Image: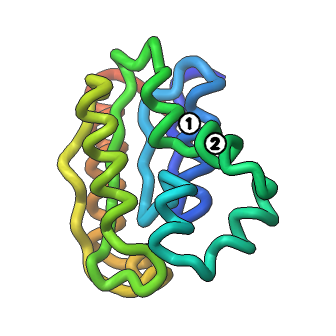
Amino acid sequence: MSDFLLIGHSAGACLAFQAAQHVRRCRAVIGIEGIYDLRDLVQEYADYQDFVESAFGADRGIWTKASPTQIVTHWVDCADLTVQLIQSREDELLSPGQTERIFRVLQDAGVSLKEIGWIKGTHNDSLRSYDCHTIIDGIISDLFENGNTPMIQ
């Protein structure tokens, strides 16, 4: 593939960031109410430990290596990559802390980063909101206007 973007919601946002580190020509990553730091997630929500362990095992070192907050610090060729984070303050499953943390990490890494797109709605309803779709449409339109034709995944 050439020139594509990745969009993920919740655990899918984590997967989008994980995938972006392994592929070239990714033009944008859009994370919607994502899980970006597994250790912080379990520290904030102890009930999520079983969820994280079933996906990554009990070794917290692996959690760290798999967390997008750690992955993006190793991105070496991110000059052409745009990142958009979208979050609802009404999300009942994930606090804005995950999004705010990766935002700071991305800023420090020098990634081309849009301001956090704050939307309304619960964890799943916000994904279907007009505001969420408008932000995504804006990113896609920007990529097309700049002469790129990304494949939507």
Q: Is residue 153 visible?
A: no
Toward the left, the furthest residue is 115
Q: Is residue 141 above or below residue 47?
A: above
Residue at horizontal 47 percent and vertical 21 percent from the top: 75
Q: Is residue 150 above or below residue 46?
A: above
Q: Position of residue 78 (x, y in %)?
A: 40, 19
Asked if labels 1 and 2 touch by Cβ distance under 8 angstroms, the answer is no
Numbered tag placed on residue 17 in the rendering: none
Judging depth in this view, the residue of 55 and 151 nearest the camera is 55
* Crowd band around label 2 with a 10 angstrom C-alpha radius: few (<14), some (14–19), many (20+): some
**Image-quadrant location for residue 89:** bottom left
Q: Residue at x 50, y 52 (%)?
A: 37
Q: Is residue 104 visible from the viewing direction of this image?
A: yes
Q: Nearer the viewer, residue 92 or 1?
A: 92
Mark 2 or mark 1: which is in front?
A: 2
How packed mark 1 is, by other alpha carbons closer than 10 Å (few <14, some 14-19, many 20 or more), is some
Mark pair 2, 1: CA separation: 25 Å
Q: Residue shown at 43%/77% (left/top)?
A: 128
Q: Is residue 48 above or below residue 69?
A: below
- Observer-nearest residue: 118 or 130? 118
**Residue linked to disc 1:** 151
Quadrant the N terminus occupies: top right
The coloring applied to the image is rainbow
Q: Amino acid at mark 1?
A: Met
In the image, residue 31 lies at what x, y percent? 44, 53
Residue beneath disc 2: 66
Badge 2 element = helix
In this view, 151 is above or below 73 = below
